[in-house]
Image: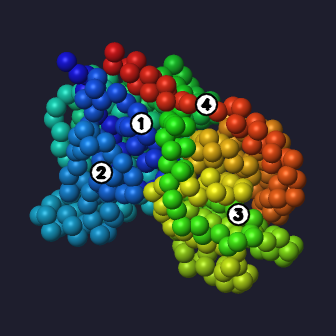
Amino acid sequence: MKKRILFLISNLESGGVSKSMVSLLNTIDRQKYDVALWIASPHGVFFAQVPKDVKVISDKRITALMQGFNGVVGLLRQGCLLRASGSLLRMGVSKVSKSWAGLLLARLMPVIDKSEYDLIVDYNGQQQLYYMVNKLRGKKKVTFFHSDYSQWPYYFMADKKYFPKVDAIFTISQHCVEVLKEWFPEQDDKIHLMENITSPLLINKLAEESFENPWPAGSVKLITVGHVVDTKGSHWAIEAAYILKERGINIHWVFVGSVSNALRYNKMIEQWSLQDTITFAGIIPNPYPYIKSADIFVHPSQFEGKSIALDEAKLLCKPVVVTNFSTVHDQFKDKVNATICEMNPVAIANAIETLIKDKALCEKYVSCLKTHQTDNTSEISKIYELVD
């Protein structure tokens, strides 16, 4: 008889956690395991990539609870007066305490699956963790935290109460493991590493698909993949583009991902006359042909857990410029397989200019990446070990 596994996630919009979730679902042996996906908001750019034999569990009330004020209207239309009132209260509480707001949201979410599973995996943390512990039936329950906890300690009070109630706590890089152990020393033996799953075979296959080339002929082709937002260093990148343009370097920089505060970023582009230098390509379900075609992959983030986009750039053997955030050394060594620079526009521009002019350094990075290709789909065994 198949062992039953349930995964929980908030949505499958663009972003590393969503991409990691669909990679895991596509890797797991569904001939051996009966897999279900509980999803708060069943939509997003990656939703179509959920395997057809994975059972999707969702509920309009939970979706509405995740939608802020718009969701309150939806709850009222569904006749859920108490939940609508609770949702308004939760939004007010969140301004004071993320922990209390997360706990309240978990209480408001109804039980929509009463069956028992051999393993339940909360893939988001926060309210999904509290909901899983309190309202779902599983022989074993585990949770994931996908970033550097020191950068996201807003739920510490609630996590301290709920982490002891799960069987394992996974995170995605060795640095993130160490930080979690510092914050939760009493859970030391439960905290484990499970890397985001990336398949070289699949990524290289997808990279061969046709695409519309956004780079003008003759320009140095730069690419950044991820949300366009300050926490990802997008404001630094735009200024770095201006610096390079002022130096007479013919670049064109393509940003693949959703844009937060587009008005502000477009104003920066207009102010510095970068309309012919920067392209916001938006969300692209298959960015790999773009990454493969680029000359340099730039990742100017302020912090990461472990960037899937960077892992994918490595698999496609692209020269990388990346900022010196806390977990970067889990993926790169400066001047060995990437250029690691400081977090400011001038440093980013200098690093890009050096790579443009130093072809030998570019070739060194590419050669190193080609000889250190890894397939980490075996990470899925850490899930199997919990149920077998």
Q: Which residue is mark 2?
A: 40
| SS of the residue under disc 2 | strand
**Disc 1 and disc 3: Cα gap in Å?**
31 Å
Q: Earlier in the sequence, mark 1 or mark 3?
A: 1
Q: Farthest residue toward the left?
A: 79
Q: Which residue is mark 4?
A: 374
Reading the image, the residue beneath label 1 is 24
Q: Amino acid at mark 4?
A: Thr
Amino acid type, label 1: Leu
Q: Quadrant of residue 239?
A: bottom right
Give residue 161's position: percent from left, percent from top.
Answer: 41, 34
Total labels: the figure holds: 4
Q: Measuring 36% from the left and 62% from the top, which residue is drawn there? A: 91
Distance from disc 1 to disc 4, alpha carbons, whole Å, reads 16 Å
Q: Is residue 281 visible?
A: yes
Residue reaching furthest to the top: 388
Badge 2: residue crowd in 10 Å (few <14, some 14–19, many ≥20): many
